[in-house]
Image: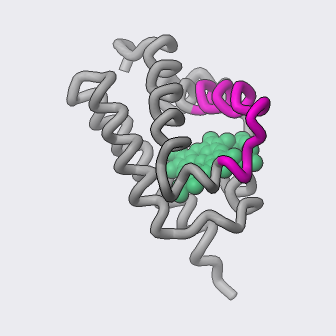
Amino acid sequence: MSDISEAEIVQLVDAFYTKVRRDRVLGPVFERAIAPDSWPVHLAKMYDFWSSVMLTTGRYKGNPLAAHARHKTIEAPMFARWLALFGQTADEIFPPEIAEIFRLKSERIAESLTLGLFFRPV
Ligand code: HEM
């Protein structure tokens, strides 16, 4: 995975959240959650996150499950849409074999988030 650069990760994250903010379903969730002047902070966090996932830089220090659990407007079916947009964006930026790694990682993380968010034992 050494042929993925930090600059490409920035490009991916920026392009993805541009799509997300315009999306009819996902856009309003982010609009409610992130104030316009807080977007640079969110994007920087996401650069760190994907850098940690793909390049094992360990830069991201956070708790994604807790961060998502705060937002009660997130619904399970939204994850398919998020993943489709993310995969599409990865395809635009990376060659197919690298885009596939991003897709697999995102699907695995989405699965663990949905389990944590929606399938807690009572
Ligand atoms: C339905 C799908 C999703 C929605 C609507 C969603 C929405 C959000 C929102 C609103 C935030 C901001 C939280 C805050 O700062 O208060 C956030 C943060 C974040 N999201 Fe998602 N998300 C989704 C799926 C995912 C997936 C699949 C991943 C990973 C592959 C992911 C990774 C992250 C990370 C790392 C953060 C930063 C958490 C932190 O504050 O440390 N999200 N997401």
Let me know if residue 70 is in the magenta part. no
User: In this rendering, would 48 be left or right of 110?
Assistant: right
The percent coordinates of residue 14 (x first, y second) are: 52, 26
Taking the view exactly as shown, the residue that stands out farthest to the left is 96
Rendered location of residue 107, percent (x, y): 40, 51
Residue plotted at (55% across, 24% down): 51
- In this picture, is 108 found above or below 105? below
First to last magenta residue range: 31-49
Q: Is residue 78 visible?
A: yes
Q: Quadrant of the N terminus?
A: top left
Instruction: Please indicate whether residue 53 sits to the left or right of residue 80 in the image.
Output: right
Counting labels gives 0
- Residue 76's spot in the image, x, y percent? 51, 69
Q: Nearer the viewer, residue 6 or 82?
A: 82
The image shows residue 79 at horizontal and vertical percentages of 47, 59
Residue, far bottom: 122
Q: Main secondary structure of the magenta part?
A: helix
Of residue 63 and residue 45, the one placed in the foreground of this image is: 45
Quadrant in which residue 98 is drawn? top left
Q: Residue at x 51, y 14 (%)?
A: 6
Instruction: State whether residue 109 appears in this view.
Output: no
Q: In the image, is residue 45 part of the stretch drawn in magenta?
A: yes
Vertical placement of residue 26 versus 95, above or below: below
Asked if 97 appears above or below 84 in the picture, the reply is above
* Residue at 35% over, 49% down: 84
**37 lies left or right of 25:** right
Of 77 and 119, nearer the camera is 77
Residue at image x 46%, y 68%? 77
Assign the C terminus to one quadrant of the image. bottom right
Q: Quadrant of residue 92?
A: top left
Query: What's the colour scheme?
Result: one colour
